[in-house]
Image (tube, grey):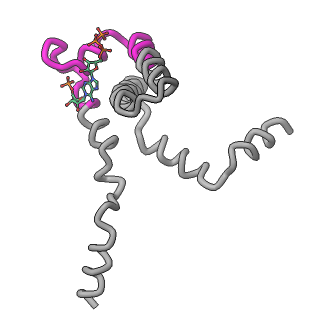
């Protein structure tokens, strides 16, 4: 029985649990930078600038990602997407939004078509 379980696990090596998710880990690091030294931590520097500036920075990174998306440059889009996600998580931390709230909202929407959802709002 134990042998069977082991074999099953070996077939799914790329599956990670939500606890191990890189975004959850990154959020914890970002949150831990609150009150840290802005001279040594870029995140602390962002926090010291305040929420509107963090939001503005997210907007800039989103625009850079959209430009690379339009250009179709895969490598640059990867880099800009990472910048954008980092700044989005920093904004969540500044506002007090926990990643789990967003994961829960995404899970709630699973299986719900965007078209059907939009139509339900019009009723
Ligand atoms: N993922 C990131 C990450 N992505 C992007 N960036 C920084 O975001 C900045 C964006 O670059 P820009 O050129 O747009 O901005 P800038 O000119 O440097 O700064 P501005 O004056 O325009 O705000 C760069 O300085 C990047 O290094 C990041 N900084 C930190 N992290 C993660 O956050 C962790 C904690 O970082 P520190 O807080 O710096 O210790 C790190 O270990 C990383 O895992």
* Residue drawn at 44 percent across, 17 percent down: 55
In this rendering, is residue 11 above or below 107? Answer: below
Q: Main secondary structure of the magenta part?
A: helix
Report if residue 93 lies within the magenta region: no
Q: Which quadrant does ligand 1 occupy?
A: top left
Foreground residue, 44 or 65? 65
Residue drawn at point x = 32 percent, y = 9 percent: 49
Picture residue at 43% right of the left edge, 14% below the top? 60
Image height of 14 relative to 118, above or below: below
Q: Is residue 105 left or right of residue 11?
A: right
Task: Residue at the far right: name it.
Answer: 123
Name the residue: 69% across, 43% down. Answer: 114
Q: Which residues are magenta?
A: 30-58
Q: Quadrant of the N terminus?
A: bottom left
Residue 24, x across and y down, in percent: 33, 43
Point out residue 6 in the picture as x, y percentages from the top left corner: 25, 80
């Amino acid at each position: 029985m134990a042998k069977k379980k082991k074999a099953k696990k070996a077939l799914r090596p790329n599956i990670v649990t939500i606890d191990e998710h890189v975004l959850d880990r990154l959020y914890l690091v970002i949150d831990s930078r609150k009150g840290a030294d802005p001279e040594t931590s870029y995140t602390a520097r962002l926090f010291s600038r305040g929420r509107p500036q963090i939001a503005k920075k997210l907007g800039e990174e989103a625009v850079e990602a959209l430009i690379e998306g339009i250009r179709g440059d895969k490598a640059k889009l990867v880099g800009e997407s990472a910048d954008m996600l980092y700044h989005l998580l920093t904004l969540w931390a500044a506002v007090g939004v926990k990643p789990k709230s967003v994961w829960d909202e995404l899970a709630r929407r699973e299986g719900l078509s965007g078209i059907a959802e939009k139509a339900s709002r019009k009723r």
